[in-house]
Amino acid sequence: MDNFMIRGGRPLNGQAIISGSKNAALPILAATLLTREKCEIKNVPELMDIKSTFELLNYLGKNCFYGYGNFVAEEHAQLKLHAPYDLVRKMRASVLVAGPLLARFRKVRFSLPGGCSIGMRPIDIHLEGFKKLGAQVAYEKGDVILSAKKLKPGKVKFRFPSVGATENLMMCAALIEGATTLENCAREPEIEDLAAALVKMGAAVTGAGTPVIKITGAARLKGLKHTIMPDRVETGTFMLLCAAAGGRIKLLNTAPKTLEALIRAMKKAGVKINTFKDSMEIIAPQGRPRPVSVVTKPHPGFPTDLQAPWMAFMARANGTSEVHEQIFENRFMHAPELIRMGADITVLDRKAVIRGVPHLLGAPVMASDIRAGAAMVVAAASAKGKSVIRRIYHIDRGYEKLEHKLKDLGVDASRVKA
Ligand code: EPZ
């Protein structure tokens, strides 16, 4: 088990190249199950979650190759239609194989994905959508079994704009001839990247990025050549790293327009941000940031995935701010770890009150999920002294080559054996 060791307290100076988006790559890799033709996907980040998806696709019968960010999937055998517990439990996003396999084979069995530290993570919205398109849902020994004599195009209105449910239903509808309408969809940029991939495969998809997506599916879909969009959560994490630790950095190969809510909040806190087409420059405020409260919302609102690093930034604000986490029921696991570093935070249900302190102090802390781990990195870089971050396997699920990029940005960071 590795740890990160970070000596904080010095301003950043440097630049980093943003990797491909984990949350765009996962559904697009699942979409390769929609066709037996060859799919080639570039700018796929080298992450544990991608490796888990790779293992699952290979288990199902795809022949997958991965190297230097390039992913190739071919199909030479009959696919299995059962995603087993041992593979699904490693990563919840495995549920994204359901839509493609149901549409292609009209039957799929997969383990109910467990919850995780940030919440129960049910999949009822996915299942309600599949039923609307003609699927039967059964449960057996912890598995969900979806089957359909014939899937039909139709209208699905999500009770909540679930990212995963929107993606699952888009992929399912892409292989159902006729016009399907999805309403109250998630509007995250990763949805638009998936739509672009499905269009290249031969489906007609309009409205991605808006609440209403229309899909005219095809009887068969073609192979795919696609390049994954930049990771907006990695970008936001490094923006907050600089804002919290001080200094000036450049981020390359990124997409500033996918982070407008974060940019607005950071500018209110006193951070200078210069944006260009595919890069940005961050200049931290002199002294402590102004306190700014945020409420997490579905895109284009403030992203829940940047709530934890945001809290690490606000820990040293010159006043009191609040964070309201409206997406997940248990996403403040980073608060007690920040308190160990000297932060003054009170959590009550889904609201955290952060009373800014002049300094954080390095300490041994623990990552409890991907983004809580990112918050530890942000806090450790801004804290005086040395921090050791344990359980960084959580961080490795979502951040590619993190210690190298931290060094490129001027952070005194290293990966050490526990
Ligand atoms: C995606 O998860 C992301 N993961 C998450 O990023 C992100 O936090 C989340 O969207 C919200 O933006 C990937 O894209 C792989 P949801 P997903 O379905 O699709 C409830 C990270 O750190 N819900 O939009 O699982 C659910 O419990 C990860 O990279 C239901 O109740 O998110 C949650 O409270 C963490 N029933 C809320 O909706 C359902 O059927 C949002 O979930 C589905 C979801």
Image (spheres, grey):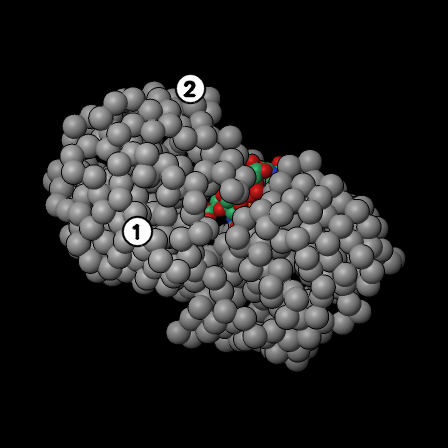
Q: Residue at x 51, y 35 (%)?
A: 297
Name the residue carrying label 1. Answer: 274
- Is mark 2 in CB contact (under 8 Å) with mark 1? no
Q: Nearer the viewer, residue 303 or 84?
A: 303
Q: Is residue 290 above or below residue 256?
A: above
User: Residue 388 appears at what percent x and percent y?
Assistant: 21, 44
Q: Is residue 106 above or below residue 159?
A: below
Label 1: few (<14), some or many (≥20) within 10 Å?
few
Q: Is residue 389 visible?
A: no
**Left-right relation of 389 to 201:** left
Name the residue carrying label 2. Answer: 348
Residue 359 found in image quarter: top left
Q: Nearer the viewer, residue 381 or 60?
A: 381
Q: Is residue 275 visible?
A: yes
Q: Nearer the viewer, residue 276 or 47?
A: 276
Q: Residue at x 34, y 29 (%)?
A: 292
Q: Residue at x 16, y 34 (%)?
A: 287
Q: Secondary structure at mark 2?
A: strand
Label 2: few (<14), some or many (≥20) within 10 Å?
few
Camera-side mark, 2 or 1 = 1
Q: Amino acid at mark 2?
A: Leu
Residue 376 found in image quarter: top left
